[in-house]
């Protein structure tokens, strides 16, 4: 099942500090708040059933209500836009996903950056979308910026940082920068050293792959 909420850019569960729905909707009238909540509940139900294409419409309806009530640059739009971006990304609509993520980031910038952790996650999601589009230079820039912000928020040894390092190492390997990729994945392995789960196994497998690749490149020089 593809989950769009309460996971990081790598599909792992994360701690969330979102306000309760009633707090999130505090800037709306009672009628608008109810309509938004109804649309978002409908979307969540469809997402839980993996009916992601159908979830897009109610999510957009909820955003439209917020836009009419709050304007097009209100910070309350940021998380809903990222959620729409996640659905679009999961269904292969990368151009539209890019627009949603960029708009969320632009709104946050107008409000002094907003939630730094959410900015970090949005940057990484945008980086993965850009990678899927083949825009690898911009993808790397987003992944690095997201990683830097994530380290500032979570600390350099947080497992979510490890996941970001795996993503960056994968991109570096893809563009032929194997040595940089190896150094990056080694950082991830150190972070996951005490995590006996899938993330640790993935990082260690990448490390072995890159060690072989770097050794082969050295032999051919």
Image (cartoon, rainbow, N blue to C red):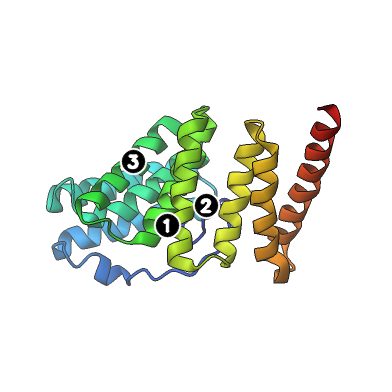
Residue neighbourhood size for the residue with mark 2, other residues' Cα within 10 Å, grouped as few (<14), some (14–19), many (≥20): many
Q: Is residue 43 visible?
A: yes
Of residue 184 and residue 49, the one placed in the foreground of this image is 184
Of residue 218 and residue 4, the one placed in the foreground of this image is 218
Q: Residue at x 43, y 48 (%)?
A: 145
Inter-mark Cα distance, 1 to 2: 14 Å
Residue 203 placement (x, y as % from top left) = 71, 54
Question: 114 above or below 102?
Answer: below
Q: Is residue 93 visible?
A: no
Residue to which mark 2 is pinned? 9
Mark identifier at residue 149: 1
Inter-mark Cα distance, 1 to 3: 17 Å
Q: Quadrant of residue 163?
A: bottom right
Q: Earlier in the sequence, mark 1 or mark 2?
A: 2
Residue 149 placement (x, y as % from top left) = 42, 57
Question: 37 above or below 127?
Answer: below
Please state if 59 lies on the left or on the right of 23 as rendered. right
Residue 21 placement (x, y as % from top left) = 31, 68
Mark 1: which secondary structure?
Answer: helix
């Amino acid at each position: 099942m593809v989950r769009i909420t309460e996971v990081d850019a790598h599909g792992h569960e994360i701690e969330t500090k979102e306000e309760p729905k009633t707090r999130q909707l505090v800037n709306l009238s009672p009628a608008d708040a109810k309509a938004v909540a109804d649309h978002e509940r409908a979307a969540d139900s469809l997402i839980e059933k993996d009916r992601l294409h159908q979830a897009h419409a109610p999510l957009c309806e909820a955003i439209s209500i917020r836009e009419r009530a709050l304007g097009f640059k209100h910070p309350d739009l940021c998380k809903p836009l990222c959620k729409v971006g996640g659905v679009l990304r999961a269904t292969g609509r990368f151009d539209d996903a890019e627009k949603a993520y960029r708009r969320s980031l632009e709104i946050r910038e107008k409000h002094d950056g907003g939630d730094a952790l959410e900015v970090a996650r949005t940057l990484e999601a945008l980086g993965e979308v850009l990678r899927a589009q083949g825009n690898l230079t911009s993808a790397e820039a987003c992944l690095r910026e997201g990683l830097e912000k994530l380290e500032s928020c979570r600390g350099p040894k947080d497992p979510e940082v490890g996941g970001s390092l795996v993503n960056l190492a994968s991109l570096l390997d893809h563009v032929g920068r194997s040595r940089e990729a190896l150094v990056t994945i080694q950082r991830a392995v150190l972070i996951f050293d005490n995590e006996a789960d899938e993330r640790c196994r993935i990082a260690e497998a990448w490390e072995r792959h890159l060690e072989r690749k770097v050794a082969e490149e050295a032999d051919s020089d």
